[in-house]
Image (spheres, grey):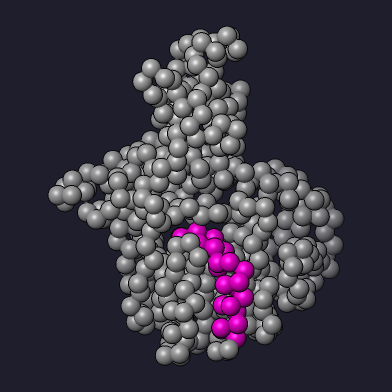
């Protein structure tokens, strides 16, 4: 919604909310009185009261009797993030796809509040600039470029991607890069390159459901490793697992892991790569969220520490620039030629128009500016959504606090069935991603992954309030 269509109270509420989230107004600060704002702004008391009521509803301020309105201190629902899972270590055949199709197929409905979606709000992306750049590039297209882009991808695009690796301190040869139809094709090709049917693959606990779908499609078995909600894979647990079990590969997301949002430190990433190198185990690194960091610098990938060519690094522009364009890539180390051959035997090549549009955008130099705006928007939405969850969800709810991306992972109190909550919510046009999707043996029955990558306007506020209410109703019905 543009500022021209906001009411006066909404404009005032948005302005004050921005000051709170930017730290200009800090927890405990008193907001200007109605009399002060009326004199300064020339607006009516009713407008000011409506704005303050909106801020209070959003969990950003609190009213104190006969004292006025104050910026609310952030009070987490508990002092702790969700507990780390304790996977059994058993090898598990994977059969998750039907559940994924059943539970997430409805998220495509535009009338559904997309808390279960895997993508942030489309209005955050520069589609018009991409379209203009794509049109310019297509007008310049030479026929030789089409055959030249088979199978590894457009040369200019690969050079731009390689440049971004170099700027991030990762040295690799451009011919190591293979452009793919999004990160999922890259990840699937890399998985296929290092496994045979029946092999065992280590995944995080919880893990991204698409990783489980990929294992299912290739007739692979999963073994889950303990994963800390803040710091990622527990290396001691992984080492124990590698010592007792023959493993073909690991599929991990060391940076802003989906669904946890966990971030492994650089030291842990280096130790992870060294541990796997000692055991000769390839690492498939899913790194699609790294550009969405809230800190000053992009976290290094595990690929930065790879000395043996065992890290197959996969990413895309789908989460950071161009959803729907399906432009991804693999930097597959010693397996690059094998991945390229698999690409040739399956999809042969990725569409030229989308590659050229993204390459043109990168060449024109607007990507960093776009990323700054995107990160700020996601950080703001994160803060607003967390405040509402703290306000509306039952006491005892645990919640992650990622430093990037756009997901939060909730552990709900005993008495809540997240799958039943999902079905209740869908009946009211609210989507969620219940925890059972994120484990081969369908654990995490009290967990939800929520997408906070959409503006926290009235629909999202109402949806979070209703979810919290339904969770409390379940607890009451269970006698809690």
Of residue 6 and residue 427, the one placed in the foreground of this image is 6
At horizontal 51% and vertical 79% (from top left) the residue drawn is 250
Q: Where is residue 340 shown, x and y percent of the image?
A: 67, 79
Q: Is residue 160 magenta?
A: no
342 left or right of 462 in image: right
Q: Which residues are magenta?
A: 254-277
Q: Is residue 441 above or below residue 71?
A: below
Please give left or right for residue 12 compared with residue 394 in the image. Answer: right
- The residue sitting at the left extreme is 479
Instruction: Count the marks.
Output: 0
Which quadrant would residue 87 be assigned to in this image?
Answer: bottom left
Q: Residue at x 45, y 30 (%)?
A: 61
Residue at point 43% right, 20% down? 68
The quarter in which the N terminus is drawn is top right
Vertical placement of residue 186 versus 102, above or below: below
- Residue 250 visible at all: yes
Q: Nearer the viewer, residue 287 or 120?
A: 287
Residue 193 visible? The answer is no
Q: Looking at the image, which is closer to me, 285 or 189?
A: 285
In the rendered image, residue 271 lying in the magenta stretch gets the answer: yes
User: 44 left or right of 165?
Assistant: left
Q: Position of residue 40 (x, y in %)?
A: 60, 12
Q: Position of residue 316 (x, y in %)?
A: 63, 62
**How far from the left and from the top, in percent, is residue 128?**
70, 43
């Amino acid at each position: 919604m543009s500022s021209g269509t906001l009411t006066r109270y909404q404009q005032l509420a948005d302005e004050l909310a921005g000051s709170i989230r930017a730290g200009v107004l800090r927890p405990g600060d008193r907001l200007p009185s109605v009399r002060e704002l009326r004199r300064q702004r020339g607006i009516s008391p009713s407008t000011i009261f409506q704005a303050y009521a909106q801020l209070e509803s959003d969990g950003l301020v609190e009213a104190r009797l006969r004292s006025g309105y104050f910026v609310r201190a952030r009070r987490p629902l508990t002092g702790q993030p969700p507990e780390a899972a304790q996977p059994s270590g058993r090898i598990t055949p994977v059969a998750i796809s039907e559940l994924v199709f059943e539970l997430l197929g409805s998220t495509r409905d535009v009338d559904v509040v997309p808390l279960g979606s895997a993508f942030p709000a489309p209005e955050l992306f520069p589609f018009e600039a991409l379209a203009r750049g794509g049109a310019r590039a297509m007008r310049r297209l030479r026929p030789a470029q089409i055959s030249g882009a088979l199978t590894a991808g457009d040369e200019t695009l690969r050079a731009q991607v390689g440049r971004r690796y170099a700027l991030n301190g990762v040295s690799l040869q451009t011919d190591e890069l293979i452009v793919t139809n999004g990160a999922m094709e890259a990840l699937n090709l890399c998985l296929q390159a290092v496994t045979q049917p029946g092999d065992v693959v280590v995944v995080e606990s919880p893990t991204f459901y698409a990783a489980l779908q990929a294992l299912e499609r290739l007739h692979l078995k999963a073994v889950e490793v303990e994963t800390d909600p803040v710091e990622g894979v527990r290396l001691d647990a992984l080492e124990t697992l590698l010592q007792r079990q023959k493993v073909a590969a690991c599929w991990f997301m060391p940076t802003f892991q989906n669904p946890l949002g966990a971030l492994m430190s650089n030291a842990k990433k280096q130790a992870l790569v060294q541990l796997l190198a000692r055991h000769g185990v390839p690492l498939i690194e899913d790194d699609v969220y790294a550009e969405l960091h809230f800190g000053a610098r992009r976290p290094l990938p595990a690929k930065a520490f790879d000395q043996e060519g065992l890290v197959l690094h996969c990413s895309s522009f789908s989460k950071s620039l161009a959803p729907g364009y399906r432009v991804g890539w693999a930097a597959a180390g010693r397996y690059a030629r094998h991945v390229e051959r698999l690409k040739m035997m399956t999809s042969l090549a990725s569409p030229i128009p989308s590659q050229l549009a993204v390459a043109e955008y990168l060449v024109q130099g607007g990507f960093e500016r776009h990323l700054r705006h995107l990160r700020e928007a996601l950080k703001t939405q994160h803060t607003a959504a967390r405040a509402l969850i703290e306000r509306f969800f039952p006491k005892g709810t645990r919640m992650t606090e990622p430093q990037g991306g756009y997901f939060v992972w909730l552990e709900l109190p005993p008495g809540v069935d997240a799958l039943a909550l999902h079905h209740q919510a869908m009946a009211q046009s609210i989507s969620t991603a219940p925890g059972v999707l994120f484990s081969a043996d369908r654990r995490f029955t009290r967990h939800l992954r929520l997408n906070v990558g959409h503006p926290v306007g009235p629909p999202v506020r109402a949806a979070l309030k209703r979810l919290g209410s339904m969770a409390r109703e379940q607890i009451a019905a269970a006698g809690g």
